[in-house]
Image: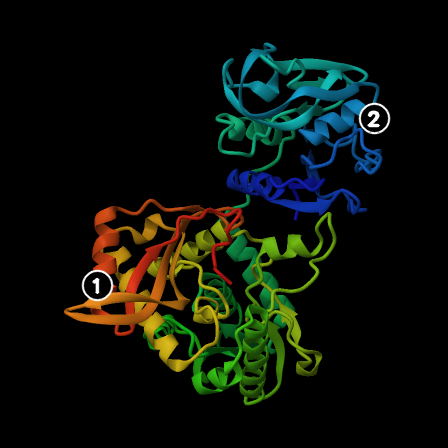
């Protein structure tokens, strides 16, 4: 694909955010670790160097060879990238007296510079570094300053190389998107052709060519990713796509039936398999979170393999892998130590002997939803909150029993339906209930009770990497608590989780 943008990752927590901002401009980009620069650069129109937790002054600082890029492709060096170009090419970087972190404003912007077109002085930017550029590199020209940072932005005379000591990709840099557009569109001449429609046309065409008349099996979860992958494949190969939706007994109340009904109306070839008893048997007596995940993963593989063998001559296994999973596997810090064992079809064993097809592997989550919209998938399905692969098993702390699953399904149903009724569901990124392994004393009527405690959790996020708890209305929480305690036998206390991520994860296990 032509008109790509190459992002070299130096380990910044914001690298994925750079990619997402570029994609929002309808420009295709790919992330590569700094030590794995592609040999063939002919398809790239521009390069962005990311930030990094490293200091350029450290002995182990990332130090890639950019000789095939500098002067040949336009470069935008962000934060560490800007300091890298200064430190190793004739400039000087020193520790700042104070850590430069947080909001700042551009107090000076050089006139008639294309990088800052339509950006005015006093524009807010986001700093995040402990070193500062004291002297610009050879042929460096200062473009912007803040009250504390003299060389907040510069370019190198004689080449299309630009550098900034702030992060244009974060929300707090108010003109960050404009700066990225100036660099990519006006300076680099990159075409804005990365649209949901273009992705659908290209992907369907590639799937037809790759798969031909072969059969594909796909494990549906009811979630956004697997659904969009299924519809894309169906558009390409029609009846040769076989979907399997497994009920592990840990889904939400009535979810197995309702999701199957939704799929039926979409024209997909779906087989529903109720293996609830099989999963509950495998989980019997297990309390450790990782042991529970492994039991669920292994049982899923067995059930899925049994069903896949019922289909003759299957060649491909389709998965709903998305781009953050791909990036993680080739990150600066190396592949993940372990694959998350709750991924439904991640890590299927060799004995299945199927080729893998992943139609969404280059999309971020928000792009998956936009592609789903382009494909005409129901808005309600595309707007579903993320739901963990192990389901309610990791929302029941301790061992799993059918009775505990029943209790949590009822509690979760009251909570989620309440969010919908109060028009709060779409304002929350993910919500759920957790059954705690403790009991508390309560009073119902004139009798003492000693029953379960449940915690409610609702967070707002963009990708799940960070999350803030949602300040739900007190009236809503009060009504929800009363409804749960009155309707769900076995629960006499409800609490609300107000922990953010980090340090707390979204799920409790």
Q: Quadrant of residue 411?
A: bottom left
Q: Quick check: 16 left or right of 489?
A: right
Q: Which residue is mark 2?
A: 88
Which residue occupies 51% across, 65% down? Answer: 229
Residue at numbered disc 1: 483
Decide which of tag 2 and tag 1 comes sooner along the chain.
2
Q: Position of residue 147 (x, y in %)?
A: 58, 12
Look at the numbered disc 2 and give the secondary structure of its residue: loop
Vertical relation: 236 (above or below) 406? above
Is 396 in front, or is 491?
Answer: 491
Whether residue 93 is visible to the viewer of this picture, yes or no, is yes
- SS type, badge 1: helix
Are circles 2 and 1 on residues that touch, CB within 8 Å? no
Residue 81: x %, y % from top left: 72, 31
List x then y, in percent, for residue 345. Answer: 58, 72
- Residue 185, given in percent of the width and then of the height, sits at 59, 31
Occupied quadrant, residue 376:
bottom left
Indicate which label's residue lies in the foreground, 2 or 1.
Answer: 1
């Amino acid at each position: 694909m032509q008109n790509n943008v190459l992002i070299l990752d130096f380990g910044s927590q914001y690298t994925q955010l750079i990619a997402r901002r570029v994609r929002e401009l309808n420009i295709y980009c790919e992330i590569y670790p700094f030590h794995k620069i592609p040999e063939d650069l002919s398809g790239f129109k521009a390069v962005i160097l990311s930030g990094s937790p490293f200091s350029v002054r450290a002995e182990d600082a990332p130090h890639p060879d950019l000789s095939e890029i500098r002067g040949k492709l336009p470069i935008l060096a962000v934060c560490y990238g800007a300091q890298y170009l200064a430190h190793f090419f004739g400039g000087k970087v020193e520790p700042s007296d104070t850590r430069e972190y947080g909001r700042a404003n551009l107090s000076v912007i050089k006139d008639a510079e294309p990088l800052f077109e339509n950006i005015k002085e006093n524009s807010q930017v986001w700093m995040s570094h402990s070193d500062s550029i004291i002297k610009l590199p050879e042929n460096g020209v200062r473009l912007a300053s803040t009250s504390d940072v003299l060389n907040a932005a510069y370019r190198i005379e004689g080449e299309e190389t630009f550098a900034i000591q702030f992060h244009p990709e974060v929300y707090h840099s108010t003109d960050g998107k404009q700066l990225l557009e100036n660099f990519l569109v006006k300076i680099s001449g990159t075409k804005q052709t990365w649209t949901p429609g273009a992705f659908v046309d290209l992907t369907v065409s590639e799937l037809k060519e790759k798969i031909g008349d072969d059969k594909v099996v796909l494990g549906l979860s009811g979630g956004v990713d697997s659904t969009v992958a299924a519809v894309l494949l169906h558009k390409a190969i029609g009846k040769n796509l076989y979907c399997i939706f497994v009920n592990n007994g840990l889904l939400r109340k009535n979810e197995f039936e309702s999701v199957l009904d939704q799929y039926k109306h979409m024209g997909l070839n779906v087989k529903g398999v109720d293996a609830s008893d099989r999963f509950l048997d495998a989980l019997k007596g297990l309390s450790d979170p990782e042991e529970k995940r492994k039991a669920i993963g292994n049982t899923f593989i067995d059930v899925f393999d049994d069903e896949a063998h019922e289909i003759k001559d299957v060649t491909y296994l389709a998965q709903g892998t998305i781009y953050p999973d791909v990036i993680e596997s080739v990150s600066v810090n190396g592949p993940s130590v372990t694959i998350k064992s709750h991924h439904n079809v991640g890590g299927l064993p060799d004995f299945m002997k199927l080729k893998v097809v992943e139609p969404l592997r280059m999309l971020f989550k928000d792009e998956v939803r936009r592609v789903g919209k382009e494909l005409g998938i129901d808005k309600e399905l595309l707007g579903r909150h993320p739901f963990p692969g192990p389901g309610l098993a990791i929302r029941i702390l301790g061992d799993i029993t059918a009775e505990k699953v029943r209790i949590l399904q009822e509690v979760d149903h009251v909570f989620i339906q309440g969010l919908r009724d109060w028009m709060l569901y779409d304002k929350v990124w993910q919500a759920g209930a957790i059954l705690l392994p403790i009991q508390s004393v309560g009073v119902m009527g004139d009798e003492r009770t000693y029953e379960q405690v449940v915690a409610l959790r609702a967070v707002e996020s963009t990708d799940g990497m960070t999350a803030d708890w949602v300040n739900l209305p007190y009236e809503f929480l009060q009504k929800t608590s009363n409804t749960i305690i009155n309707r769900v036998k076995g629960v006499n206390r409800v609490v609300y989780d107000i922990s953010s991520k980090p340090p707390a994860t979204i799920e409790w296990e």
